[in-house]
Structure formats: structure tokens, C-alpha cells
Amino acid sequence: MHKRAEQLVVEELRERLERITHGPARHHETLPFGIPPIDNHLPGGGLKLGSLHEVSGGGNGAVDGAASALFSAGIAARVKGKILWCVTRPDLFMPALAQAGLSQNRLIIVECRDEKGVLDCFEEGLRCNGFGAVIGEMSKLPMNMSRRLQLAAESSGVVGLAIRRWRHPSGAAEFGQPTAAVTRW
């Protein structure tokens, strides 16, 4: 009975927001993981497409970076369309990405000079509704930039995956700070 009361409160708040904003909120599809304990905790029963999601292995080692990249590749493999992957170093291992289900025929890799270039390409990719997913690897993701990425993803319906990787301990200084990502993994 308690859950039903919570649902009624949430529905009432949504209706109020729709009246205040003069229309229903924009809804995007979700991508279920097919694992009930995860899907049951995510709004809509899956990963919301048309949104920014943050992924991190929690460290600067090769294992942490590989885990984040493979998790992101597995998500990207399940959406339709080409995948844009923005990096500063060409260290993606295609056989591993293929094992995660991501075909090299769908992948476009952009190597940028620095993280500012990655963020710029990431944002432009998210604004183009021709991609299924855009992935950007960076160590820093300031709130204002993450908000811009979230808005770009919302407007195009493209899923954005920000992989937080750092190669030096100084790069982890801002890790854990708030971002506009819908989920953090």
C-alpha cells in the first residue's frame, strides 16, 4: 500500500510539472539490461536513451579503463545506428569491443588532441541524430559541460556515454563531483 501512495504522489508531481512547463516532458525509449534487479531500479525499466550516462572503472589502471570501455561498448552495441567514439589516445582494442558485440563497421573513432577536443566532438556528435550512441573518454567532466551534453542528448535522442578515465592521479581530483548525467556506473 505504501508503494501505491508514493506512485500517486509522483504522478501528481508530474502533472503539476506538465502544467507549469506547458506540456508533457519529452520521453525517450529505454534500453533494458534484461537483469531484473538492475532494470527494476532504473526509471522506465532500463537505461534511458537520449540522455547522458557516466561510466568509470574507479581507477587509472588498464583493467579499470578496459572494464569501462567494454561496458560502454556493450551498451552501444545494442542501440541502432553508427557509434561515435571520441578519444585522446588510440588505445581501443577492437577484438575486445567485437566480443562485447560492437561491430567495427558501425564504429567511428575520432582521436582528439586533448580533452577539450573530446568534449567538443562529444557534444557535436550528440547534436547529430544520425548516431545511435556517442562515447567520449575524459578525466574531467565539469557540471556546466555535462549539462550541455545532457541537453544535446535530449534534443537528438542519442545516448551519450561519458567514460571517466585518467592516466595520472591528478586527473582524479574532480572525480565524484556532481554532473548532469542521468546515471553513473
Image: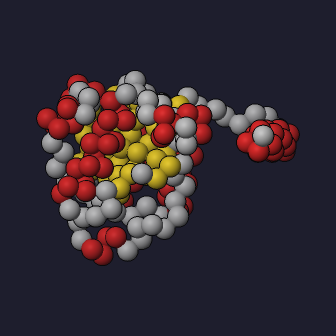
In this rendering, the answer to whether 143 lies above or below 47 is below
Which residue is drawn at the image coordinates 42% and 71% (left, top)? 174
Which residue is drawn at the image coordinates 38% and 51% (left, top)? 55
Q: How is the image coloured?
A: secondary structure
Quick check: 28 left or right of 59? right
State the image coordinates of residue 96 (x, y, percent, origin top left). 17, 38
Quick check: 143 left or right of 172? right
What is the quadrant of the N terminus in the image? Answer: top right
Quick check: 108 left or right of 24? left
Between 133 and 128, the residue placed more toward the observer is 133
Between 176 and 90, the residue placed more toward the observer is 176
Which residue is drawn at the image coordinates 32% and 42% (left, top)? 71
Which residue is drawn at the image coordinates 57% and 46% (left, top)? 151
Q: Quadrant of residue 88?
A: bottom left
Q: How many marks?
A: 0
- Is residue 130 among the parts visible in the rendering? yes
Between 42 and 85, the residue placed more toward the observer is 42
State the image coordinates of residue 106 (x, y, percent, origin top left). 28, 27
In this rendering, the answer to whether 107 lies above or below 137 is above
Between 8 and 57, the residue placed more toward the observer is 8
Quick check: 1 left or right of 128? right
In this rendering, the answer to whether 111 lies above or below 116 is above
State the image coordinates of residue 133 (x, y, percent, origin top left). 40, 35
State the image coordinates of residue 5 (x, y, percent, origin top left). 80, 42
Q: Quadrant of residue 124?
A: top left
- Is residue 155 among the parts visible in the rendering? no
